[in-house]
Amino acid sequence: MRPRGVFVSYSQSDREPAFGIVSRLEGAGIDCWIAPRDVTPAADWAAEIVEAITAARVMVLVFSASTNDSPQVRREVERAVHHRVAVLPFRIADVLPSKSLEYFLSSQHWLDAFPPPLAPHYTRLIDHVRAFLGAEPVAPAAASGSFAAPGAATGSVAAASGPATTGTVPALIEPAQLKRFETELAHYIGPLARHLVKRAAASAAGPESLIVMLGTEIESEAERGRFVNACRQFLRSGK
C-alpha cells in the first residue's frame, strides 16, 4: 500500500461531505486515503484500514451526529491516537462527541464547519492540514471572511499586518512576546499554535498586529476575546 498523508474517517451517512473533503484536499496537492475507494480489491478490509491509518500523518475526522453511533469510526480514531497520528475533527454539525469518543478527542483542535454550506470552510481545513504536514500553508488572505476578527471589516487583518515580508520576525516583536502569544493561543488550538505564530509573525507589523492576526484562528468569539485581552495585558505589564 502506498502511504498517504491524510486518512479521512467518516460514517456512511457522511459519505458525500467526506468525498468532498478528499476532492478539495487532493485538488490542493494533498494525498488522501479513503475507504472504499482506496481499499485493494479482495484485500482484508480491516487490515488495510489499520495499515492506512498507521502510514498516515493526519486523520481528518468528518464529525456529525452519526459519528457518535459508528463503532467503525470509534475504532479508527482509537487506532490513530494509539499510533500517534494527529486527529483533526472537521465538525459538520453542532453536536458533541459521545463519552467514548471524547476520551480520544478531548485534547484535539476542532474545526467547526457549520452552518452549511461547507465550501467556505474547506480553505481553512486545507490550511490546517498543510500545517500538520509541514507544507506551505494557504495565505491568510485566502481564508473565509467568516473567521474575521470581531468588529473588523473584511480584509482588515491583512491591512493591519502591513506589507508582507519574506524575512525573519520583525525586530518590533520580542522573543518573549512570541513565546507568550504561542502559549496563550495553544490554550485554544493546541500544538498548531507554534506553526501559526511563526507564520503570522513573518508578516506582522508589530505585536498588536500579530495579536489580531492570531485571534482570527480562534473560532469562538468569547475565546477569541479572552486570547486578545490576555496578550494585550502581557504587552502592558510584561507578565
Image (cartoon, grey):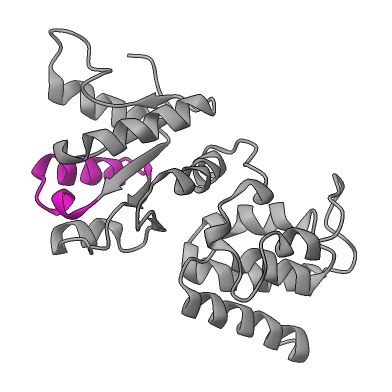
Give coordinates of residue 236: x percent, y percent: 77, 89
The residue that appears at 54% across and 75% down in the rendered structure is 224
Q: Nearer the viewer, residue 231 or 125?
A: 125
Outermost residue toward the top in this view: 42
Residue interval drawn in magenta: 64-86
Give coordinates of residue 116: x percent, y percent: 35, 52
Q: Is residue 158 visible?
A: yes
**For residue 17, above or below residue 187:** above
The residue that appears at 22% across and 46% down in the rendered structure is 78
Q: Is 73 on the left or on the right of 115, as rendered?
A: left
Give coordinates of residue 28: x percent, y percent: 54, 29
Instruction: Tell me the quarter of the image containing the N terminus.
Output: top left
Q: Is 210 on the left or on the right of 182, as rendered?
A: right
Q: Nearer the viewer, residue 217 or 57?
A: 217
Q: Is 204 on the left or on the right of 119, as rendered?
A: right
Splitting the image into 4 quarters, where does residue 9 fall? top left
The residue that appears at 15% across and 61% down in the rendered structure is 98
